[in-house]
Image (cartoon, grey):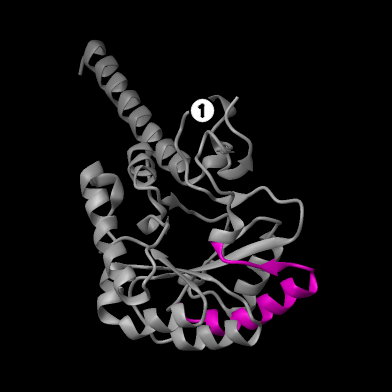
């Protein structure tokens, strides 16, 4: 092999490596908004948490597949008079309408988690609107209340997803504390993770069918109550109004009062 061919192959290898690194960095930025600099203020973000100067937080549950523990979660939350936000998939509503009604009857928010848990980044804006409309129709049909909040399946989003969601008057919601209960962590590990990461204005992510969540939840609630926290549904945690006019979202995903400068 002559020297020219060797140089060409090296350049191709370097280019391929750079492309792979760029792809990895892009995935990381999408899923970790805190790494985006303040100069990226035009990027569209969901609400990860809310700026608060007192101890208040929201706990949320995603419901997409199983239903074994939903009533147990309702009972635990009821014991402590805690109201939570449940993001449910439309197909889950089809399968378990009685559980959706039980959630609403217990005073919990039932919000949208899409109609069929698709990867929203691959959908067009109209497909996103159609999907959320279908899910909203199902939730409203059972609870009588149309969802005003939405959590992206898999936590995936980009600018066109967020713009499409907000065009419907729906607020996209992420989280700043992931319990990782979906990894089947022990109850002790879930409890330690959540209680050590919560801060005023946090939104905590759980799942309704995770293995050890019912076991961990009472201890988490008791520990946070002892720390002086109040629990409210997400619609009561977030600031009202229009993004960019009544509030802003900083580069970490924190919703802050005041319009854009």
Q: Determine the residue positioned at 51% across, 82% down.
A: 106
Q: Residue 9, position in %: x, y?
A: 25, 22
Please state the total of marks drawn on the protein image. Answer: 1
Q: Determine the residue positioned at 52% across, 29% down.
A: 41
Q: Magenta stretch containing residue 243, yes or no?
A: no
Res 224 quadrant in image: bottom right
Residue assigned mark 1: 40
10 Å crowding of disc 1: few (<14), some (14-19), many (20+): few
Is 17 positioned to the left or the right of 137 in the image?
right
Q: Residue 155, position in %: x, y?
A: 41, 54
What range of the chain is rendered magenta?
210-234
Q: Determine the residue positioned at 46% across, 82% down.
A: 105
Is 200 positioned to the left or the right of 44 in the image?
right
Question: Is 100 placed above or below 251 here?
Answer: below
Q: Residue 186, position in %: x, y?
A: 57, 78
Q: Nearer the viewer, residue 39 or 137?
A: 137
Q: Residue 104, position in %: x, y?
A: 45, 77
Q: Determine the residue positioned at 28% across, 53% down.
A: 119
| Quarter of the image where the N terminus is located | top left
Is 72 positioned to the left or the right of 21 in the image?
right
* Residue that extends furthest to the top in the rendered view of this protein: 4
Q: Nearer the viewer, residue 145 or 187?
A: 145
* Residue that extends furthest to the front in the rendered view of this protein: 144
Question: Is 74 placed above or below 255 here?
Answer: below
Q: Nearer the viewer, residue 180 or 228?
A: 228
Dot 1 lies on which element? helix
* Residue that extends furthest to the right in the rendered view of this protein: 227
Question: Is 157 placed above or below 36 here?
Answer: below
Q: Magenta stretch containing residue 224, yes or no?
A: yes
Q: Main secondary structure of the magenta part?
A: helix
Question: Is 211 placed above or below 112 here?
Answer: below
| Quarter of the image where the C terminus is located | top right
């Amino acid at each position: 092999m002559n020297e020219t061919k060797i140089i060409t192959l090296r350049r191709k290898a370097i280019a391929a490596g750079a492309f792979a690194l760029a792809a990895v960095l892009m995935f990381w930025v999408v899923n970790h908004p805190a790494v985006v600099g303040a100069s990226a203020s035009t990027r569209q973000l969901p609400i990860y948490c809310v700026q608060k100067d007192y101890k208040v937080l929201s706990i949320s549950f995603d419901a997409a597949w199983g239903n074994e523990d939903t009533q147990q979660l309702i009972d635990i939350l009821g014991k402590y008079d805690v109201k939570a936000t449940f993001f449910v998939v439309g197909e889950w509503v089809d399968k378990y309408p009685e559980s959706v009604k039980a959630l609403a009857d217990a005073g919990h928010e039932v919000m949208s988690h899409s109609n069929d848990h698709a990867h929203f980044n691959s959908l067009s804006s109209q497909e996103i609107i159609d999907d959320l409309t279908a899910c909203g129709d199902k939730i409203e049909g059972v609870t009588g209340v149309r969802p005003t909040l939405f959590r992206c399946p898999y936590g995936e989003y980009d600018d066109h997803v967020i713009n499409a969601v907000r065009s419907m008057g729906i607020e996209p919601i992420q989280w700043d504390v992931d319990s990782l209960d979906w990894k089947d962590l022990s109850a002790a590990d879930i409890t330690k993770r959540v209680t050590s990461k919560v801060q005023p204005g946090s939104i905590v992510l759980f799942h309704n069918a995770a293995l050890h969540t019912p076991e961990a939840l009472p201890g988490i609630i008791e520990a946070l109550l002892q720390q002086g926290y109040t629990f409210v549904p997400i619609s009561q945690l977030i600031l009202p109004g229009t993004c960019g006019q009544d509030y802003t979202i900083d580069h970490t995903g924190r919703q802050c009062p005041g319009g854009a400068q």
